[in-house]
Structure formats: structure tokens, C-alpha cells
Amino acid sequence: MQDAASGPVLVELRGVDKRFGATQALDGVSLDVRGGEIHAFVGENGAGKSTLGKVIAGIYAADRGEVVVDGTAVDRWNPGIAQRRGIVMIAQELALVPDLTVGQNVFLGAEEHRFGIERRNIAERFAALDAQIGFGLDPGEKVRDLRIADQQKVEILRALARDARIIVMDEPTSSLTAHEMEQLEDLMRTLRDRGCCVIYVSHFLDSVLGVADRITVMRDGRRIETVDAGTVSKHELVTSMLGREMEQAYPDRPPRPEPVDPLLSVRELRTGTGVERMSFEVRPGEIVGMLGLVGSGRTECLRAVFGLDQVVSGEIRFDGRDWVGRTPKDSIDAGLVLVSEDRHKDGLVLQRSVRENIGLSSLPARARGGIVDRRSEKRIARDLAESLEIRPPDIELPVGWFSGGNQQKALLGKALAAQPKLIILDEPTRGVDVGAKRTIYELIVRLAAQDIGVLLISSEHEEIMELAHRAYLVSEGQTFGEVIPEQTTVEDVLFQLFHVTTGEESAA
């Protein structure tokens, strides 16, 4: 890491406050960001780190305090002005136009015109820009056809096309594989070495410690400290974020349930979405994991079980009944609930309140003659928001105002309001901080203790190995083995997954 103190101060915040209704998102925050540094913002979900990045990028105006750019306080501050001053933000939810090409997205709003007519030189401009950074993207490819990692590259190229000096990256790694994370970290270093400031908002502390020059810790809207990354440990960061010593990362695994009949049984399942031969079962009170690499077919299989995707052949039995051909409504009514990995696309209505979102899954049970029992809805939502530690604890605020981790808790609350017998959790801790992860882990253990079956997908294999009673190995749309996490290691599981994926061993 280079000497972060050597770069010029590009932006300074002095005593900045920001409120959303009754919620104090930022409270008297002062800090600076400098050229030629990677400056990470860390903290629990709802700590204010994303809000801080958005104030710097002009997306939010400060309610009080000063924003100083290149040594001069700015009176007006918005995204347009910030962009003209070389400050851009790449949000967690990418803001690209899917039906336009890579090149069109990169130069959207920055097209060159002559006499009011757009000059058709996008390919030339793109080639010159890409030569500086070396992404190798096809400027003619539609953005909708790109992987998330390549879409992020388009956002970065768009920032560089506007001569960005400061690039705020808000949770850029939440949807990336380990290899793609390494590529992004290399890119951040390249940008830093060119003199840019990269503001890295992340909950991945290992990545932060591996790439950042300075780290600012946020808690409850306040800046707790800014430290050189080389002088702090992961344990010290977590303690600073939480304001207390962190207990062990995982709760104790609940006792193994009695060997009763399965609640869910799947045999030789095939779907039109790439599932070729999946077989597994889950008993009441059992936590069962699905261990596989990205693209192995785990999500596609469980979507078919829930009723979202069509089954081509095979058997699904839930609670003693044939479940092939059932709809999602059938599943929810019977107590089979899916928590999707994409909370914005498949899980939440961001413009509606936390109360309304939590109540959606159980709406028919509380409606009589088309009239919803609001008192019951409010009671259920308040109880779940309290037990899940949703912050701020105001269930009437739109769920879109909350941090990613608290949105995830609201999504879990929606699932729990349906009183499930079996809950499918697809990447339940994606995009959440260490404190929120612990809350979710405790919830999983608590559900199992209540004889609720849990089917868990996670790309963080350690989560499954620490929580599950059993786990199935999945590759290329097939289950090919079963492990008892207490009797094996993550390293051994990865060896088996990669061994099968590379074709060195045929699936059993």
C-alpha cells in the first residue's frame, strides 16, 4: 500500500449532518478524501457509510455542515455539479440501460455533438478509453447480456469517460465471485495509481484490509475513527464498528433432529432451467445446506420446488403431498416459503413501508371481504422488526430508505409472517455486515429449534459448514454427494466441488 497521506485533499466534509424524517443518518461527520488513495468506509448496516458516500457524490445534500471541494466550500451540491467536478458514484444497484450497448452506456449523456448532430465516433472513443484500463469489453454488446462483474466495468468506464477524480463504489463486491472480487481489487489499485481516489464502501473486511490505504469506521451516523489500513486488524475493526467485543461469529449448531419422515423430498428432479438430476430431503427442525459453485443449479432447483420454474421430470413431495406443478401461492399457503437472493427484484416493494412488506405474505389470512386488519398487520410487523433488530425501528418508513442489511431483515420478516414449516434461504447474508449476519445466523438456529426445516444456499461455504446438520454437493445441475459438516472441512468440500467441475471425476 502506498502512503495515503501523500495525496492532495480533494474533498473535505466539516460537521455534516443528514436526516431522513426522524432518522439521523449522519451526525456531525468530518473527514477528508485524497487523490491517489483507496479510502474504505466500513460499519454495520445503517451506520451511515453509504449515506456518507452519497453526500460526497452530491446525491444527498447535507442538512448542516460544509462540503469543501479543492479547498473551496460549495454552496450548491448535486450529482450534476459533482460530476463536473470529477466525482461520480457507482451504486450497489447499477444504473445502466440494459437495451443499449456497452459503448452507448459508457458515453450516455456525454456524446459529442456538432451543430446539434451527434457524432458517430463511439467506437473510436471507446477504444481509446479502454486502452487506458484494459477491460477488453465489446462496445457493441448489449449490457443486458453481460455478467454483473462486466456491468460494473461499464460503470467504471462511464466514470472515467467523464474524467472522474473520485469514484465512490457502494458495495461493489456483493454480487461477485471470489475471482471477480480479485479483479475488482486490482482495478481499484490501477485507478489509485493513476491518481484517482476510490471510496470503497464495503462490508467485506478481508477485502477492505487487503486493498485500502485508509479506513473510516462509521457507527450510528458518526465517524468513529479514520486509520491507516496497515495499522489495524480485522478484530479491531469489528470491535470499533460494533462498539463492543464481537462474540464468536456463529451460534452453536442446534441438536440434530430425530430421524422422522422428511418434510421435503426431491428425487431425480429435472427442469428447463439447467437442473439435470437433483435429489435431497429435509426433515422438520433440520438445517440442510446446498454446497456448490456459482452456476451449479442450486437456485434453479429451489425455484422449481417453490413453484416458480417448470419441472420436466422427477418427484417433489412436501408435507406428505405431491408438489410437482404447484404454484408459489400454493407453497406459501402450505408453509413452504422462499427468501430470494435478489431482494429488490423478487422480494420487496421498496416504495411501501416495512409494515406493508412484512405483511404481504400473510395478507389473505388477515383480510376479510377485501379489508385488511391493520391492527393485526401492525402488531405482527412490530414484533418481527423488534426480534430481527431492524434499524431504525420505524415500521412505517418506506423499506427503500433502509440499508441493505435492514432490507434483508424485512425480507426475512415477510417470510416469517407466513408461519413457514420449511423456509428456503437463498444467499440470506449477501450484502449485510457482521452484526446483521450474526442476527440472521441466530434466526436460522432458532427456526430449527422450533421444528421448522431450513434449506440454505450460500456462496460463503463456511456459513453452511458452521450452521447445517447436513449438506449436499451440487455441480452442473446435479447432486453428487452428501457431507456432514462437523466431520469434514471447507477445504475438502472445495476440492470435491472443483474436482467434479473440472471433469476430473464423474458425478456419482
Image (cartoon, rainbow, N blue to C red):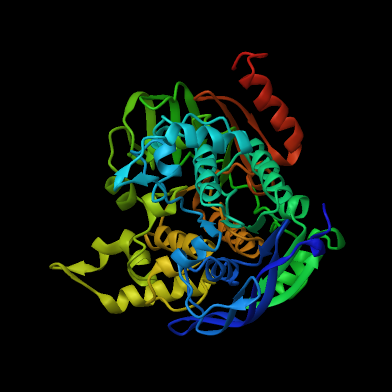
Residue 356 in the image: above or below residue 447:
below
| Res 180 quadrant in image | top right
At 76% from the left and 37% from the top, the residue drawn is: 489
Say if residue 246 shows up in the picture.
no
> Which is more toward the observer, 477 or 140?
140
- Outermost residue, left direction? 369
Q: Position of residue 328 (x, y in %)?
A: 31, 45
On screen, residue 87 versus residue 265, left or right, reads right
Which residue is at a point 47% across and 67% down the rendered structure image? 81
Residue at the spot x=72%, y=55% of the render?
208
Would you place residue 65 above or below residue 45 in this image? Answer: below
Name the spot of residue 190 as percent of width and height, x first. Answer: 70, 44
Q: Residue at x 41, y 35 (%)?
A: 121
The answer to whether one can see residue 240 in this image is: yes
The quadrant in which the C terminus is found is top right
Q: How many marks?
A: 0
